[in-house]
């Protein structure tokens, strides 16, 4: 209970200070476009490590080639997934996020400045434009992070994967990088009760669209096979952690 109160009071103050610093440094982001995301990373680490007392374990670093960029896909079980992913994964990536987050005063503008890409759920034209914007991010050499379930799934089984990330892999030739986020749902027991937990990030080997093309399958079947493999891989690794 006390830890929860400390988190909400001092975490809010910390967030306000970081937001002020973020906008103060905004002019310099034109010289270094990666600066906004680095500030968001600092904020995420502060909330998790200092205010929540959360330990972070990362495995699978050897599966990342820092000379290339990826379409990162992961499970999504908790609000703290975003903090963990941003704090723990040392790639310059941009979030593919629901548009409602971009409407939050100050916070939404910061997301735009950081280069994150909004998408409106259930609107085909918006999703199509958003995918075009993600392509531009990939062309600039940055990675993108997508929750293929489209929303949080606070259950033991993954939700159905949407095909957006895999369509990007097909059209850009960029590899899918499967990542598992484990135990993030155990940090907040209730709104005001925070438990010291060690959360895990498991980075798997990248998956290439071209490796699924054998000349016998149509494009739709190739994509379906790829989705099944990646979702199955994430589910298996996730199950092993619980």
Image (cartoon, rainbow, N blue to C red):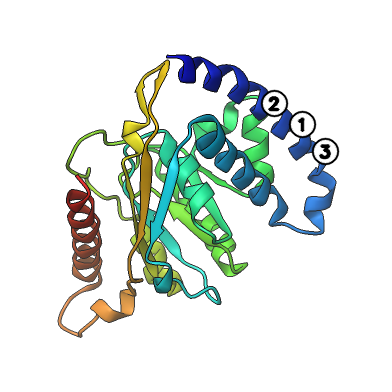
Q: Secondary structure at mark 2?
A: helix
Query: Looking at the rendering, which quadrant does residue 12 occupy?
Result: top right
Residue 49, percent from left and from top: 52, 39
Q: Secondary structure at mark 1?
A: helix
Query: Looking at the rendering, which quadrant does residue 167 occupy?
Result: bottom left
Q: Which residue, given by chain and number where applicable, does mark 1 sit on?
A: 20
Q: Which mark is residue 1?
A: none
Query: Looking at the rendering, which quadrant does residue 171 occupy?
Result: bottom left
Q: Is residue 203 above or below residue 76?
A: below
For image coordinates 15% across by 82% down, the residue present is 216
| Left or right, 197 with reference to 83 | left
Front one among 221 and 24: 24
Q: Which residue, given by chain and number where applicable, does mark 3 sit on?
A: 24
Q: CA distance from mark 1 to mark 3?
A: 6 Å
Q: Which residue, given by chain and number where applicable, does mark 2 sit on?
A: 16
- Seen as rendered, the residue at the extreme bottom is 215
Q: CA distance from mark 3 to mark 2?
A: 12 Å
**Contact check, label 1 and label 3, Cβ < 8 Å:** yes
Residue 10, percent from left and from top: 62, 21
């Amino acid at each position: 209970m006390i830890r929860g109160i400390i988190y909400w009071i001092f975490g809010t103050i910390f967030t306000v200070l970081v937001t002020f610093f973020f906008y103060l440094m905004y002019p310099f982001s034109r010289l270094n476009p990666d600066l906004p995301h680095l500030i968001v990373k600092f904020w995420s680490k502060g909330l998790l490590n200092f205010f929540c007392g959360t330990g972070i374990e990362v495995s699978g670093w050897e599966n990342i080639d820092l000379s290339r960029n990826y379409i990162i896909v992961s499970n999504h079980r908790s609000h703290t997934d975003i903090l963990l992913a941003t704090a723990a994964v040392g790639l310059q990536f941009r979030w593919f996020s629901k548009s409602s987050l971009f409407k939050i005063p100050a916070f939404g503008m910061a997301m735009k400045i950081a280069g994150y890409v909004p998408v409106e759920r259930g609107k085909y034209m918006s999703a199509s434009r958003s995918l075009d914007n993600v392509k531009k991010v990939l062309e600039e050499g940055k990675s993108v992070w997508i929750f293929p379930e489209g929303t949080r799934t606070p259950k033991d089984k993954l939700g159905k994967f949407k095909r957006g990330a895999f369509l990007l892999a097909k059209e850009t030739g960029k590899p899918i990088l499967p990542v598992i986020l484990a135990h993030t749902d155990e940090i907040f027991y209730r709104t005001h009760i925070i438990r010291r937990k060690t959360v895990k990030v498991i980075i798997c080997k990248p998956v290439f669209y071209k490796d699924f093309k054998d000349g016998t399958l149509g494009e739709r079947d190739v994509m379906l096979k790829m989705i099944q493999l990646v979702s199955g891989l994430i589910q298996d690794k996730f199950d092993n952690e619980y």
